[in-house]
Amino acid sequence: MLIPDKWLLLIGTMAYVAALILTLVRLSDRRPPMHGFNLVLILCGWLMQTTGLWILGMEAGSCPIRNPFEVLQFISWSIIIVYLFTGQVFRLSLFGTGSASMAAIIGFLAFLIPGATHIPENYYIGGDPRINAHASLALFSYGIFGLLAVISVLYLMQNNSLKTKRNAGIFRFLPSLMDMDTVLMRLLIVACIVYTISIAIGALYWFSNLSEISLAKLVLTLALWVVYLLVMFLRATNKLYGTRLARTLVLLFVAALLILWPVEASRSHAHPHPAISSETLPPDNAD
Amino acid sequence: MPTDSPRLVSIGCNHHKTPLEIRERMALSSEGVKALQDRLKEHPQIREAAVLSTCNRIEIYAVADNGDCEREIAGFLEGINGFPVDEFFQHAYVHENLEAVKHAFSVASGLDSQMVGETQILGQMKNSYAAAIEDKTVGPVLHRFFQKSFQAAKWARTETKIGSGQVSLGNVAVELATRIFGRLTVSRTLVIGSGEVGQEVAKAFRSRGVACMSIASRTHERAEELAREVDGLLIPFNTWQDTLPYVDVGIFATSAPDHILDRKTLASVLAKRPRKPLFLIDLAMPRDIEASAGDLPNLYLYNLDDLGTIANENLESRQKEVDRCFAELSRKAQYTWKGLGLQRSAAHKG
């Protein structure tokens, strides 16, 4: 049986699915999506997810990113929070539905991965607030990378429908290519800034604890950072744009998700501290 | 020498059976139409004739004595536009007598058009009729035939709803541009040529408030008139290629016999405007833009057929009305056919 925090996370994920289904039903009926109702569903889902993650966070005594389940839920939550802040500014049609779909996929993935909820016995997240802040911000930027992938997929769909001259169904309601191009650049800048701050905070810890750092994690994290910066630079200088940019951002997000595994593994190996428990916590934190 | 057993024939090719790339090869200029009309006039077996040439069809209506005049008509066409007779017959249709009347009624009322229910074809048919009168190639049968076709078209337009809910080419083009650029108030548009369809599309863009519209045409008067109507900027025809890198939407509707814009030129235009998409609408027949350019990234190329297909997407909802219109026009055609006084020859032939 699922414990309350898992139920909340599952209901939150289901709310995102409901937003997607509602849009698909409307589109199949040749009607435009209901933006207001969709937003309410997404907001409800996000509140459920927030509460679930809050319970897990209280349990962890830190940001709840102790295992793949929590990491994926945190990324899913980040996608929606960034959408909630930016969606009303960018006003892209189907952006909410796309974000909800991506959050739902990642949210469900967290439930489906076998053993994803297992917290290693020797796992101890940092202990140092710098590494905690680094990890949280890095995963938050994953949320933005996720949104970049969402808009990229919408871009590719719009481009493909225009090239193949299909006008019916969902294609009529997709945002314009130029609007998506502008939003991609803005989100790319935000993602790079957040990820850079995350790297900078992490570096403060790494420099003083070089012996504890996993080389694989360091290389992969820095490689991802460099690649995103490079993509931003190429886009700013008009060297990478249009469908090539969109494909790159989708592939980069998939790659970013895939490297989470080695990073996660190296993290638990790199911190062979005793697990958090009431016995190991300082007296003022103990129950 | 004419015999006393004439028949009504319509022979032609249209968008239903003939792809765009074939249609543009068989397209006739206004001089070509005149030349064809003259040859038909001289043919001993053809008593009356009229030529309807639009971007979607070439049709010849004739009252001919019994015999195989169809092949000779196709031969005339080959002599003018070089389109081989055998290839013509691969795509052509031939209607005789009552079927020819039914077909003409469908054409005139827009039921046979690419965008079902459109009214432009009626004007084009009237022009063909006027040209044939001027050429003195119409007689009592075709006079009545055309008059009745126009009446049928009027009935279809006023008494049925075949045109309601119809989307114009202009609106389709504007909607596509919106999917590319979002707001059009910052988009620049270039109109090349000043044909009727081009004007319609240009006006649709202007009504959506495009930032700037430039017009270039070989026919200065018509371009000037269009520029006035859409509050556009008239530019010399020989400079339009220089402005292409700075525009977002290009509407091409010239009567040039060949491409005026090839893939290579467009690739260099796109290189000068990285990141910004280019939307080109080719309304010309033959086409103004090399079709293979449509593969270039960041370029969205639409021709008449593409726009027509999108415009007809809501045809399903109008199908009932279209069927009713067909049935009624068929009844009217039978009545007209009796009035043409050619039944005896048809019965004799049958």
Image (cartoon, coloured by chain):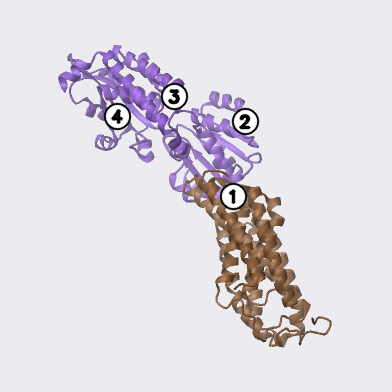
Chain colours: A brown, B purple
Residue that mark 3 sits on: B160
Residue at mark 1 shares a chain with residue at mark 4: no
Question: How many numbered marks are there?
Answer: 4
Label 2 chain ID:
B
- State left or right for residue B95 relative to residue B110: left
**Disc 4 or disc 3, which is closer to the eye?**
3
**Disc 1 or disc 3, which is closer to the eye?**
3
Does label 4 or label 2 sit earlier along the sequence? 4
Instruction: Please tell me the numbered disc located at residue B58.
Output: none
Does label 4 or label 3 sit earlier along the sequence? 4
**Disc 2 or disc 1, which is closer to the eye?**
1
Amino acid at pointer 1: Leu
The answer to which image quadrant residue B324 occupies is top left
Mark 2 residue crowding within 10 angstroms, few (<14) / some (14–19) / many (20+): many
Q: Examine the rendered structure and indicate whether residue B338 appears above or below residue B167.
A: above
Residue that mark 4 sits on: B77
Residue that mark 1 sits on: A177
